[in-house]
Image (cartoon, helix red, strand yellow):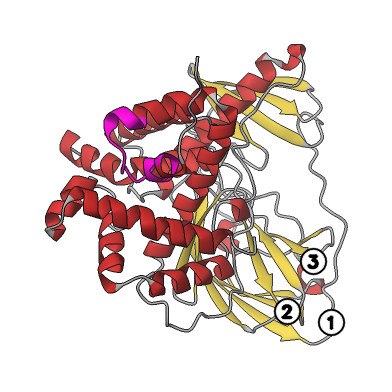
Amino acid sequence: MIEVHSSVEQLGGYFRGLLDDATSATVEEHCAACPACAARLRDEARVELSLLELVEGGAAAPSLPVPPRRVRPQRALAWAGAGLVLAAAATFVLVANRHPPVVATAPPAMISKDVPSSSAASSAGVDPVSPTEMQVTLAEGATARLRLPGITAFHVDGSGVVTPLFRGDDVILAGDAAGSERIVFQTEAGVTTVCRVTVTVAGGREPAHSPPASETCARCGLADLESFHVQKAGVVSVLFSGDVVTVEAHRAGRSAVTFVSHTGEVASYVFDVSPAAPQPPSPQPPR
Amino acid sequence: MTRAEWDAIIRAHDRRLLAHLVARGVRIDLAKELAQEAWAKLIEQERDGQLRDLQMPGLILRQATFLALDAARRQRWETSAEGAPERADVAPGIDDVLASRSELARMRTAFARASAAEQRIFLALYEQPQLTCAQVAAGLGLSEQRVKQVAYEVRKRLRAALVEES
């Protein structure tokens, strides 16, 4: 059998539909079986995404001045859709350049119960101004990472460019230019919050840091959770580290939660939710 | 939402979805299956009233990424007893996928060097992903072969600009 690899043109034209149906099918069939061409197709997929970004970002205006890039997406992990309502674990973790993560602050409207103390925030140069504003002070040339666990999606609207980000993405704040960015958060519950982050550059001052927060699950004791899933009413929802399951008191029923850690440990819990009986009206205080 | 409306959305975003998955190391045949499953789930969610608004392409990309991660984990668990399994790198650094500002700047510069006609054809093709190459060509009053030729040529130059120095 003669092995015919896909050509650069075929691989390059595949994603935009430049190939006829028969050639497309041939490319798919070949790349499914040929690791070398699969790797080349992967490269072409990356190029294709860059081309789309170029076109959507205004390819026709190359002469426009390029604003300094102070906020950029760093990492895309995953989006965990779940049948249950996932609360926004609005624990903002600010990771200073090459330092362990330090706890920053979060808009109070999105704070959940387990939000750590914001005392470390000020030491990191992060100051809450209002529920929808944050100030970050960075040493000149330093960078900080805004980590947003529990947020299903958000986008950064900076310098006129909207960058969509997903769960697990980090926002990099760079201390090379003072300014502000508008970040729009969207949670699985449909909550949308707009926060303006203002970066101030302070020459020579390094952001302080505190030890990283423990990632041990309070319920199962497993450290460094990789994923867990919830079984409820016959529906299994797979979740990932950083997700939060909110139990709604008005919905009675039984749910099972299974945790799996990076080390392969597994722990399962079954819990029943019973709505509390209506509380009698509290007695009037004596006058 | 009607079937026709869904078809239009799928036409507009399906190829980007495939590129998104393949760029993350998902094999093309599996990527097609995952894409189909992701669309099916999204349609079902919309029919059940679970989606307040359809923000594309972010919504379908997240849905498919979730499915890909789930599939990769399942495969890893199922084959854990047989040694290290092959797994799709579905959660790489986004730096690997999104062009950096400097890369985009290089691509813009390369694009600016293309002739006005080439730019017009290339933009018409990439700004209307829901259209086939033949439809774009008809809209421009050109032959399909000419549109493809320009697309390949411009893409080749932009690709070269993208990978240089990287």
Quarter assignment of residue A146: bottom right
Badge number at residue A205? 1
Q: Which residue is mark 2?
A: A137
* Whether labels 1 and 3 share one chain: yes
- How far apart in space, not on screen, are marks 1 and 3 (Cα)? 13 Å
* Label 2 close to label 1 by CB (< 8 Å): yes
- How far apart in space, not on screen, are marks 2 and 1 (Cα)? 9 Å
- Find residue A224 and report its horizontal and vertical position in percent: 79, 37
- Left/right placement of residue A56 relative to residue B135 reads right
Residue ID at (67%, 22%): B76
Q: Residue A212: within the magenta? A: no
- Stretch in magenta: A10-24
Q: Which residue is mark 3?
A: A97
Disc 1 crowd rating (10 Å Cα; few below 14, some 14-19, many 20+) is few
- Find residue B16 and report its horizontal and vertical position in percent: 40, 45
- Please say whether residue A75 is visible from this viewpoint: yes
